[in-house]
Image: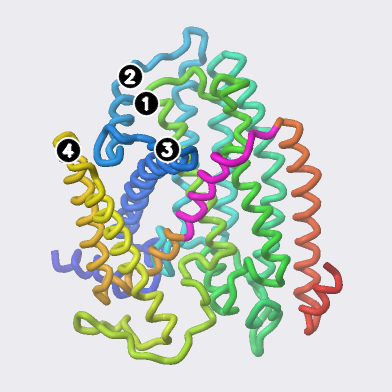
């Protein structure tokens, strides 16, 4: 028992990921946390999408099940589990059964190398970005097999659209990613820094290494070689919406043309797996974008600390709680302040609820939810907790921003025609991505002042 405790403690005292430290126990714990956290995130995303779209369209959205419909996703999950599982008579039953699991496994496997912090990842591979792009692309196999195995015209057309869409946007996405990998080989500080004293011009494909390169250079890569980094980010942002079959690029499941697309013949639990995979894939590609361009777990302004101040402690100080700059103090307290702000919103809306007996449960539920958020906010002020989860907070907050954009796009833009979809991928994004890659590679070898050179070229 004592040896097991030491085995568990050995990882907590290290600065490596569980995979890097070879600690099987913590690797399993991280896998369970990622699996559980991702499942909860999908449930929350389902509720938020319905509520946000409703408010964009001046509606209320789910309101009947739980306070403000908070329990509606759970009710939907129970309904899907209890629905009859139907397999078409002429379908290939084995492939039909396996297809949704292929899509889900591809979406979840990506998170093996997603770095929520310098040590908060299941493992760190020296080819992490290739692993993420390769595994995330496998989801199209599940979609194609689902459409083919159904032995129906609508699913087959949806599957073929999805495969064509995946190929079209994967190329432009890859070019944008390569431009970021080039930036990791530069060790100079600032937006246009290209070299550093005593450093070799070597890059990295490690997901953690890419974030550390942004920390070393003191700039997020979305601003590197401005506007090249921003253009590469825009290409990836557009391509990732198409990769996940979301509006306005949701042609594989366009309800007005294909009834529902590749999952037309699915029902109940297997139907829900496709949506679990879709939302998981959205989180996965958002995590890639955050890691490559927005500093991963780094807080804003990573190269600026402000005047030195002593960070106050509400509990006895720990080794991680060292004095820092004024901005470091603000960003360290930001997670707790954010949760307290959300708790205050819940209490405010609790006070505004109608004073009617039928709204009693709604009011109590919303107040209880606000109390839970408030307790979490207070816990996040504890130095040991704050220092351990601060990285996870900033990473999650950035990913949440992308998830909101997904909802915004769906409620704003009309659906593209398929020929327009192909035109954007092959005639706009691909040449632009190639040009950005060439300019980024050229800028890396141009002596200062690079800023003037870029302005003259662009």
Q: Nearer the viewer, mark 3 or mark 1?
A: 3
Residue linked to disc 1: 269
Which quarter shows the N terminus?
bottom left
Question: Dot 4 surroundings within 10 Å: few (below 14), some, or many (20 or more)?
Answer: few
- Distance between the alpha carbons at the discs numbered 1 and 4: 38 Å
Rate crowding at label 3 as few (under 14), some (14 to 19) or many (20 or more) other CA atoms within 10 Å.
some
At x 81% / y 44%, what residue is drawn?
A: 427
| Residue 249: x %, y % from top left | 63, 37
Residue position marked by numbered label 3 in the rendering = 50
The answer for how far apart the CA atoms under marks 3 and 1 are is 20 Å
Q: Residue furthest top?
A: 89
Please tell me which residue lies in front, 444 or 295: 295
Q: Earlier in the sequence, mark 4 or mark 3?
A: 3
Q: Position of residue 354 (x, y in %)?
A: 22, 42
Residue 356's label in the rendered image is 4
Q: Is residue 50 left or right of residue 292?
A: left
Mark 2–mark 1 Cα distance, whole angstroms, equals: 8 Å
Q: Position of residue 265 (x, y in %)?
A: 49, 17
């Amino acid at each position: 028992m004592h040896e097991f405790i030491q085995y568990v403690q050995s990882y907590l005292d290290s600065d490596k990921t569980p995979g890097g430290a070879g600690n099987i126990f913590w690797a399993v714990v991280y896998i369970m946390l990622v699996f559980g956290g991702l499942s909860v995130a999908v449930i929350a995303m389902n509720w938020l999408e319905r509520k946000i779209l409703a408010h964009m369209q001046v509606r209320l959205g789910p309101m009947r099940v739980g306070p403000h419909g908070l329990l509606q996703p759970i009710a939907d999950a129970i309904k899907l589990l209890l629905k009859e599982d139907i397999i078409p008579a002429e379908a290939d039953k084995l492939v039909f059964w396996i297809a949704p699991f292929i899509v889900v496994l591809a979406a979840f496997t990506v998170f093996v190398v997603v770095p929520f912090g310098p040590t908060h990842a299941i493992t760190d591979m020296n080819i992490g970005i290739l692993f993420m792009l390769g595994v995330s692309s496998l989801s199209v196999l599940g979609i194609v097999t689902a459409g083919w195995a159904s032995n129906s015209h609508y699913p087959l057309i949806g599957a073929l659209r999805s495969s064509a869409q995946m190929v079209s946007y994967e190329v432009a996405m890859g070019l944008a990613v390569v431009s970021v990998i080039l930036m990791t080989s530069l060790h100079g500080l600032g937006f246009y820094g290209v070299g550093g004293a005593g450093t070799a011009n070597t890059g990295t494909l490690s997901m953690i290494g890419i974030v550390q390169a942004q920390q070393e250079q003191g700039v997020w890569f979305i601003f590197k070689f401005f506007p090249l980094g921003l253009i590469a980010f825009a290409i990836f942002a557009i391509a990732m919406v198409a990769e996940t079959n979301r509006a306005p690029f949701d042609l594989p499941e366009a309800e007005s043309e294909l009834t529902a697309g590749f999952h037309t013949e699915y029902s109940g639990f297997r139907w829900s797996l496709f949506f679990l995979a879709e939302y998981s894939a959205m989180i996965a590609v958002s995590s890639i974008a955050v890691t490559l361009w927005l500093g991963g777990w780094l807080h804003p302004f990573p190269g600026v600390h402000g005047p030195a101040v002593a960070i106050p402690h509400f509990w006895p100080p720990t080794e991680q709680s060292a004095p820092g700059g004024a901005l470091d103090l603000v960003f360290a307290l930001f997670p707790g302040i954010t949760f307290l702000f959300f708790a205050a919103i819940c209490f405010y809306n609790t006070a505004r609820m109608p004073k009617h007996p039928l709204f009693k449960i709604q009011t109590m539920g919303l107040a209880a939810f606000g109390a839970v958020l408030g307790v979490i906010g207070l816990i996040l002020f504890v130095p040991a907790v704050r220092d351990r989860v601060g990285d996870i907070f900033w990473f999650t907050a950035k990913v949440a921003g992308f998830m909101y954009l997904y909802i915004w796009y769906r409620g704003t833009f009309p659906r593209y025609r398929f020929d327009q979809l192909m035109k954007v991928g092959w005639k706009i994004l691909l040449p632009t991505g190639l040009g950005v890659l060439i300019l980024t590679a050229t800028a890396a070898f141009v002596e200062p002042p690079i800023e003037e050179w870029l302005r003259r070229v662009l």
